[in-house]
Image (tube, grey):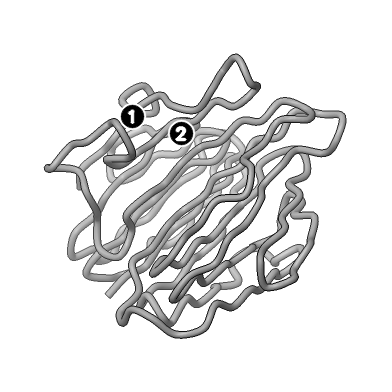
């Protein structure tokens, strides 16, 4: 198990424009050849947008993009005609396939914080697709079959336990709160990269919200 702390993330974005980004993997100018991916996961970005701030239209290709809003509301528009507002508890997936363009903005009055995770597809190309699952229930897995991955969302009370999925690659990201995982205490923004995970548990030290990726 390789624990990466929130304080180790690469800082990016444009703070003067109301955009703050924290990157868990090699990203843009923060090139690290030893930190390019873990399993299918090639990015896990914490994004903080001030009211009125956002990312203007930009392209993606050959990437499965999954977004989780921690607070606020995210406005999404893409070149395939989708326009949605993503709220806390919603899972959004944009399969960029052979190519798609999108806009992400905070059109609300409150600050916006979201976690965006990029996964490499098993096969390149294809047609772009989009899905949003509103208010996904606790412990309900969300499959991203094109990347051979499954997302598990867990909301724990203090003292509550949850099994960590067994898998070749498991990535655990703490959205909020504190948890204990195999003797390590993890706080907001911390992550654990687990290879050949088996029979592990996470325990809420406080109330907590976790994103767990199970990858083949």
Residue hosting label 2: 189
- Seen as rendered, the residue at the extreme top is 16
Q: 159 or 209, which is in the foreground?
A: 209
**Residue 43: percent from the left, percent from the top?**
37, 49
On the picture, is 174 further left or further right than 91? left
**Residue 133: percent from the left, percent from the top?**
71, 70
At x 57% / y 36%, what residue is drawn? 176
At x 61% / y 30%, what residue is drawn? 48
Quarter of the picture containing the C terminus is: bottom left
Q: 17 or 20, which is in the foreground?
A: 17
Q: Cα distance, mark 1 to mark 2?
A: 7 Å
- Seen as rendered, the residue at the extreme right is 109
On the picture, is 72 further left or further right than 17? right
**Residue 192: percent from the left, percent from the top?**
31, 45
Q: Residues within 10 Å of mark 1 (few under 14, many from 20)?
A: some
Q: Is residue 82 above or below residue 203?
A: below
Residue hosting label 1: 5
Q: Are dots 1 and 2 in contact, CB under 8 Å?
A: yes
**Residue 71: percent from the left, percent from the top?**
72, 38
On the picture, is 89 further left or further right than 116? right
Q: 42 or 169, which is in the foreground?
A: 42
Helix or strand or loop: what does disc 1 sit on?
loop
Helix or strand or loop: what does disc 2 sit on?
loop
On the picture, is 52 further left or further right than 8? right
At x 66% / y 30%, what residue is drawn? 49
Q: Which mark is residue 97?
A: none
């Amino acid at each position: 198990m390789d624990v990466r702390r929130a304080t180790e993330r690469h800082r990016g974005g444009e703070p003067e424009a109301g955009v703050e980004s924290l990157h868990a993997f090699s990203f843009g100018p923060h090139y690290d050849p030893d930190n390019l991916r873990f399993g299918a996961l090639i990015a896990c970005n914490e994004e903080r947008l001030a009211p009125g701030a956002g990312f203007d239209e930009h392209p993606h290709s050959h990437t499965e993009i999954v977004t989780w809003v921690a607070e606020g509301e995210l406005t999404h528009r893409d070149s395939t005609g989708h326009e949605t507002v993503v709220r806390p508890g919603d899972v959004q997936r944009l399969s960029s396939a052979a190519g798609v363009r999108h806009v992400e903005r905070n059109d609300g009055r409150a600050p916006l914080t979201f976690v965006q995770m990029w996964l490499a597809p098993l096969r390149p190309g294809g047609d772009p697709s989009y899905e949003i699952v509103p208010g996904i229930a606790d412990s309900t897995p969300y499959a991203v079959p094109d990347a051979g991955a499954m997302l598990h969302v867990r909301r724990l009370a203090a003292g509550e336990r949850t099994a960590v999925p067994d898998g070749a690659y498991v990535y655990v990201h703490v959205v909020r709160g504190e948890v204990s995982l195999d003797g390590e205490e993890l706080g907001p923004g911390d992550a654990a990269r687990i290879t050949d995970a088996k029979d592990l548990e996470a325990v809420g030290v406080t109330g907590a919200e976790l994103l767990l990726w199970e990858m083949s």
